Image (tube, rainbow, N blue to C red):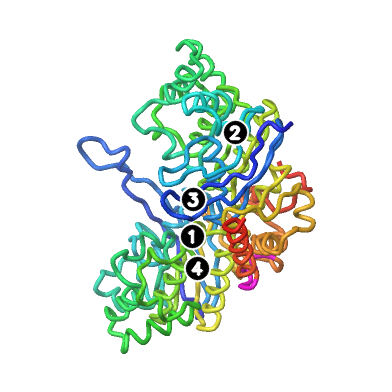
């Protein structure tokens, strides 16, 4: 039994018939990293947001099952659901600039969750925050805990968000494009850190990204999405050997690579885009007449 | 004499307002520390470096959006380093820029047609609206897009409008500053293909600023690697990628996550 099991998850735009996620199913085991890839608007972030119960106000879950630790989150009353999510799951957000409150010091931004959701006392929460910062190799954690976000570099802030995500020992982490805003050299350090932390804590990790290179390095399984629909779900090795869907193959050919420039940055052909759009439209028709 | 740019010992410092005392001048922050290089006509040069390496500042100094504090910038043999704005005006049409974020560089209240035609009118180009429509053709957008607003376009389409605006003036030199970093791989590939084709068939010279070496490899003839305001490597792409000399270039190359799960990357 997988730690996270999603079945037929459908998310729609309130007040319209539009669907943002079209019956998505996926499973992630403890200790496993699943990549969610697709273009912007493909719904990859939406999956993470639906799991964590932080969908935008304009969106709502229309159907499906989100099972975490064998329990369907969508069937729980809202209060209990929030508590379960807070205790068992965490988010590593994309932009370290906006994810931290600029007017508060680092310490309370990490400890608030431990105190409010897990009910720890303040001293214990602060000790844990210090330990977590040390675990992500931040030198002089005590000084950093007293800092404001603007006093720290982008890479440092992203480390803090990783420390904060792991602080409550969650079993599931959603990382939403955690390195997109970073430099390549810093990106590599952060990816290594996420991989090491995930392996040490045996966390189930959902890694949202549009960069197939990053998927190749950090994920074991992957899901390719288009228009909120799953096109392909496979293990990473077989994907890079032979993508199973024409659209994913085109996406791979469009990815820049320095070691093979001639075979990279090929624009996705129009007929492939049209075919995948038709597939999405057909799925909608099926559902309506279903 | 086929250099479009000849840059000699270029230095640029800015006031460090974060450390300005209450009274008295702010300390100077050295951004560019003596850069010397040439750009040949018709060449596509990549400028690469980490954040804070000075690559955008260098671009802005080439366009004289910033005034260098030392060294010389020659554009077709003319020293434009400290040229006053009025004297620069004739050069402005010939030196164009495409910006990183099309959402903030395209006026949200103007239609695409107006956006492309505005600089044409400013520089007194004949038949500006017809020229603007032709520029849309050249970047592969339908002419009907002239009556749309930027928010109605996708990221890739907006960036193509940015290209259209730059090439409509028939400049000699275009600076593209991180123009694909906000785009998906699929639209990135498309925008780069269009940019490369237009640069080649209009015979333009392009400086392409990016932090992504894979993109530079595909697009550029030559690459300049910046590290902390200094050039650490400058050479033809093939050579630099095959035999990187500088330690920093090797580090950049090693940090690229290539789409291959089998190599031991970490």
> Does any portion of residue A290 appear in the rendered image?
yes
Q: Measured from the top left, where is residue B39 in percent x and y? A: 51, 71
Density class for disc 2 (Cα within 10 Å; few <14, some 14-19, many ≥20) is many
On residue B178, the disc is 1
Q: Distance between the residues labelled 2 and 4?
A: 41 Å
Disc 4 designates what residue? B207
Please report, as a chain letter, where disc 4 is located.
Answer: B
Q: Is residue A255 left or right of residue B166?
A: right
- The residue identified by callout 2 is A173
Same chain for mark 4 and mark 3? The answer is: yes
Residue at image position (31%, 79%) is: B90
Badge 2 marks a residue whose secondary structure is: strand
Q: Nearer the viewer, mark 4 or mark 1?
A: 1
Q: Disc 3 designates what residue?
A: B53
N-terminal of the pair, mark 4 or mark 1, is: 1
Q: Which sits earlier in the primary sequence, circle 1 or circle 3?
A: 3
Q: How crowded is mark 4: few (under 14 residues within 10 Å), some or many (20 or more)?
A: many
- Residue A209, given in percent of the width and then of the height, sits at 59, 48
């Amino acid at each position: 039994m997988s730690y996270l099991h999603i079945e037929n998850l459908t998310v729609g735009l309130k007040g319209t018939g539009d669907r943002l996620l079209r019956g998505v199913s996926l499973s992630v085991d403890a200790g496993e990293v699943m990549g969610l890839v697709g273009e912007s608007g493909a719904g990859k972030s939406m999956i993470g947001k639906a799991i964590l119960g932080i969908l935008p106000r304009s969106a709502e879950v229309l159907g499906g099952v989100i099972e975490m630790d064998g329990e369907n989150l969508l069937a729980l009353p809202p209060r209990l659901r929030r508590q379960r999510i807070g205790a068992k799951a965490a988010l590593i957000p994309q932009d370290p600039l906006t994810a931290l409150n600029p007017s508060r010091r680092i310490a309370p931004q990490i400890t608030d969750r431990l105190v409010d959701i897990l009910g720890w006392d303040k001293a214990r929460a602060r000790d844990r925050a210090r330990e977590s910062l040390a675990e992500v190799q931040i030198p002089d954690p005590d000084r950093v805990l007293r800092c404001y976000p603007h006093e720290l570099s982008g890479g440092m802030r992203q480390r803090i968000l990783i420390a904060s995500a792991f602080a409550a020992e969650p079993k599931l982490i959603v990382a939403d494009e955690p390195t997109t805003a970073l430099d390549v050299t810093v990106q590599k350090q952060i990816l290594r850190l996420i991989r090491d932390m995930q392996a040490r804590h045996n966390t189930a990790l959902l890694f949202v990204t549009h960069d197939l290179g990053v998927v190749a390095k950090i994920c074991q399984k992957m899901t390719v999405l288009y228009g909120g629909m799953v096109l392909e779900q496979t293990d990473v090795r077989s994907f890079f050997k032979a993508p199973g869907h024409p659209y994913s193959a085109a996406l791979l050919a469009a990815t820049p690579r320095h070691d093979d420039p001639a075979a990279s940055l090929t624009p996705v052909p129009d007929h492939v885009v049209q075919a995948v759009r038709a597939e999405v439209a057909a799925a909608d028709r099926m559902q309506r007449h279903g | 004499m086929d250099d479009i740019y000849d840059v000699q010992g270029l230095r640029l410092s800015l006031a460090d307002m974060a450390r300005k005392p209450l009274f008295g001048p702010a300390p100077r922050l050295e951004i560019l520390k003596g850069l010397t290089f040439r750009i040949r006509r018709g060449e596509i040069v990549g400028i690469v470096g980490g954040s804070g390496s000075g690559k955008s500042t260098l671009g802005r100094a080439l366009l004289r959006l910033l005034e260098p504090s030392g060294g010389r910038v020659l554009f077709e043999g003319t020293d434009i380093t400290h040229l006053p704005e009025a004297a620069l005006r004739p050069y402005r049409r010939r030196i164009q820029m495409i910006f990183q974020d099309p959402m903030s560089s395209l006026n949200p209240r103007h239609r695409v047609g107006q956006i492309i035609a505005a600089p044409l009118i400013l520089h007194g180009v004949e038949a500006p609206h017809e020229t603007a429509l032709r520029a849309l053709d050249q970047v592969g957008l339908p002419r009907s897009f002239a009556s749309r607003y930027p928010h109605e376009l996708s990221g890739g389409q907006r960036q193509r409008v940015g290209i259209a605006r730059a090439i409509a003036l028939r400049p000699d030199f275009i600076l593209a500053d991180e123009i694909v970093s906000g785009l998906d791989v699929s639209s990135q590939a498309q925008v780069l293909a269009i940019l490369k084709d237009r640069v080649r068939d209009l015979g333009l010279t392009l400086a392409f600023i990016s932090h992504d070496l894979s993109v530079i490899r595909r697009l550029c003839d030559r690459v300049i690697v910046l590290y902390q305001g200094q050039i650490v490597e400058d050479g033809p792409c093939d050579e630099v990628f095959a035999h990187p000399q500088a330690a920093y270039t090797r580090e950049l190359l090693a940090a690229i996550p290539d789409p291959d799960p089998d190599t031991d990357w970490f």
